[in-house]
Image: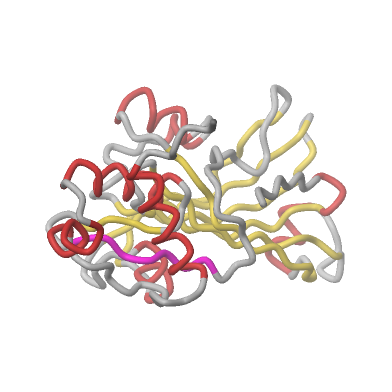
Amino acid sequence: MAEAAPKYELIANDLRQKILEKAYETNEQLPQEAALCKAYNASRITIRKAMDILVNEGLIYKRRGSGSYVKDITENQTAGQTRSLEVVEGNDITTEIIDFAVIASPEVVTEKLKISSFDFVYDIRRVRKKAGVPVAVEQSYMPIQTVQGMRLDVLSQSIYTYMENELGLIPQSTHRLIRAVYAGKKAGKLLDVDEKHPVLEIEQTVYLNDGRPFEYSLIRLKSEEYELQNIVVV
């Protein structure tokens, strides 16, 4: 006889279904912990375990001192825990830094990173090269209050490795939208292709394991350098 699932899993399953069925809308706040305890006749520890499952699946995010909110899952993604990886990686990948600045957060970045319009972000522009040949142009934004102490030497390597090893921040999941576009003048010049050359544009928001968004980026990538592998949990 199969053992019954733990109560926190049952609660997570019920909340997940409600989120996917749009009972809770994007960016809507979920009921407070006390209300969930009463609704499910469960302890605070049980509710927290259930919410942690949804955070790790990329369905909700938490705001300190405020509560839990539904993430934007309209980008045709599957609910499931995924490890966030950089689009271009490998031993033969090198990075050229085009620009690095601290700026006031643009409106779209403010929305994607769930920060205040008065907050500042890193504006990072890089060219990724494979065996010396440019394959991708990246523009990334990160909130300076989350990813502190960014340095030029970090930008030429793996930002995520720096975050894990020096800041104790763990990238967890990526919400990614991929579309086919022309390279355009700026990206075409950096990629050494014609401005009408077809490339893939990847728009993505990356989240930490506590549900906080910490990076919003736009990447233009030579299509022959990108392979998509997708695992769907049903």
Residue drawn 73% across the image and 67% down it: 179
Residue 159 among those drawn in magenta: no
Give whichever of 124, 107 is nearer the camera. 107
Q: Is residue 124 left or right of residue 202?
A: left
Q: How many numbered tags mark residues here?
A: 0
Residues drawn in magenta = 67-73
Q: Nearer the viewer, residue 37 or 84?
A: 37
Between residue 104 and residue 14, name the one nearer to us: 14
Residue 69 magenta-highlighted = yes
Give the image quarter of residue 166.
Answer: top left
Q: Is residue 212 left or right of residue 189?
A: left
Q: Quadrant of the N terminus?
A: top right
Image spot of residue 105 (x, y percent): 33, 67
Q: Position of residue 4 (x, y in %)?
A: 44, 38
Q: Position of residue 19 (x, y in %)?
A: 44, 68
Q: Quadrant of residue 153?
A: top left
Task: Name which quarter of the figure residue 23 lies in.
Answer: bottom left
79 displayed left or right of 229: left
Above or below, 102 relative to 177: above
Q: Is residue 199 left or right of residue 30?
A: right
Name the residue at 16% across, 61% down: 38
Q: Is residue 164 above or below residue 221?
A: above
Residue 120 appears at what percent x and percent y?
27, 60
